[in-house]
């Protein structure tokens, strides 16, 4: 199924890939924050959640690209 904002499968993959790039950047910054100044359980939980979002979005992009 395609997002309503995407006009084609290629567009959907492109938008997901952009989102994945942003999620990875957020994940990196949260890890840096946790490693330096905010060693709290809340930040640790956010790092774990961002990691899950990276995994989910990666699978969406990979599966959509591999479909005929």
Image (cartoon, rainbow, N blue to C red):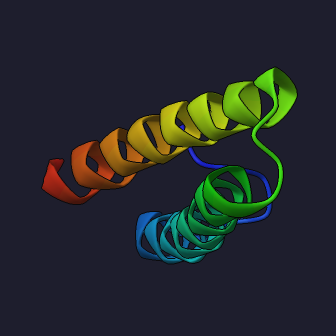
> 29 or 13, which is in the foreground?
29
> 4 or 34, which is in the foreground?
34
Q: Which image quadrant is residue 63 in? A: top left
Q: Position of residue 12 (x, y in %)?
A: 54, 65
> 50 or 20, which is in the foreground?
50
Query: In the rendered view, would you say 53 is above or below 41?
Result: below
Task: Evaluate whether residue 68 shows in this view.
Answer: no
- The residue positioned 46% from the left and 35% from the top of the image is 56
Query: In the rendered view, would you say 29 is above or below 55?
Result: below
Left or right placement of residue 40 versus residue 54 in this view? right
- The residue positioned 24% from the left and 59% from the top of the image is 65
Q: Position of residue 27 (x, y in %)?
A: 60, 57
Query: In the rendered view, would you say 1 is above or below 66?
Result: above
- The residue positioned 51% from the left and 31% from the top of the image is 52
Left or right placement of residue 9 versus residue 27 in this view? left
Q: Position of residue 33 (x, y in %)?
A: 74, 60
Query: In the rendered view, would you say 47 is above or below 64?
Result: above
């Amino acid at each position: 199924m395609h997002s309503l904002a995407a006009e084609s499968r290629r567009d959907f993959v492109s938008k997901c890939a952009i989102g994945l790039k942003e999620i990875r950047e957020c994940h990196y910054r949260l890890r840096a924050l946790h490693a330096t100044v905010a060693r709290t359980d809340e930040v640790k939980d956010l790092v774990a959640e961002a990691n899950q979002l990276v995994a989910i979005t990666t699978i969406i992009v990979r599966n959509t690209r591999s479909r005929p």
